[in-house]
Structure formats: structure tokens, C-alpha cells
Image (cartoon, helix red, strand yellow):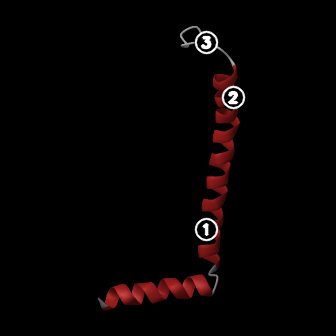
Amino acid sequence: MGDLGASFWAAARLIVSLDANLVEIVGRSLWISVTAVLAASIIGLPLGASVAVFRFADQAR
């Protein structure tokens, strides 16, 4: 149990001290997540709107 507690406090120290490597990793992760959301929105929103607005051949009335 001592190793788990030591790991927790080491992680807390890195977060509180704004360790440069940690900030870089978190920033890159956020950048990738935002880019993925934007890419999905660019593709998904127009497709969803077209499904909502246009009639298709097999669509039930």
C-alpha cells in the first residue's frame, strides 16, 4: 500500500508544480481531442442535417 500512496503523492506533486513534461502531454492530448471533435463535426453535422432534411428512396412516409 505504501507504493500506491507514494505514487499518488508523486503525481500530485507533478500536477501542483506544473511539470513541463506533464503540461506538454496534457496539452498534446487536449489538442488531439479537440482536433478529433472538429473533424467529426465537419463530417457528421452535414451528414446528419442531410438525413433530417432530404427524403430518401427507402424512407417510410
Q: Report the Cα–Cα distance between label 3 and label 1.
A: 44 Å
Circle 1: residue type: Val
Task: State the image coordinates of residue 47 (x, y, percent, origin top left).
Answer: 65, 28
Which one is closest to the eye, mark 1 or mark 2?
2
Residue 60 left/right relative to 35: left
Mark drawn on residue 56: 3
Is the residue 10 above or below the residue 51 in the image? below
For badge 3, the amino acid type reads Phe
Q: Farthest residue in the top direction?
A: 57
| Type of the residue with mark 2 | Ala
Residue 2 image point, x, y percent: 32, 91
Q: Secondary structure at mark 2?
A: helix
The residue labelled by disc 2 is 49
Is there a contact, CB below 8 Å, between mark 3 and mark 2? no
Q: Which residue is disc 1 drawn over?
A: 26
The answer to which of marks 3 and 1 sits earlier in the sequence is 1
**Placement of the C terminus among the 4 image quadrants:** top right
Q: Residue 24: give x, y in percent of width and height.
A: 64, 69
Quarter assignment of residue 46: top right
Nearer the camera: disc 3 or disc 1: 3
Q: Quadrant of the N terminus?
A: bottom left
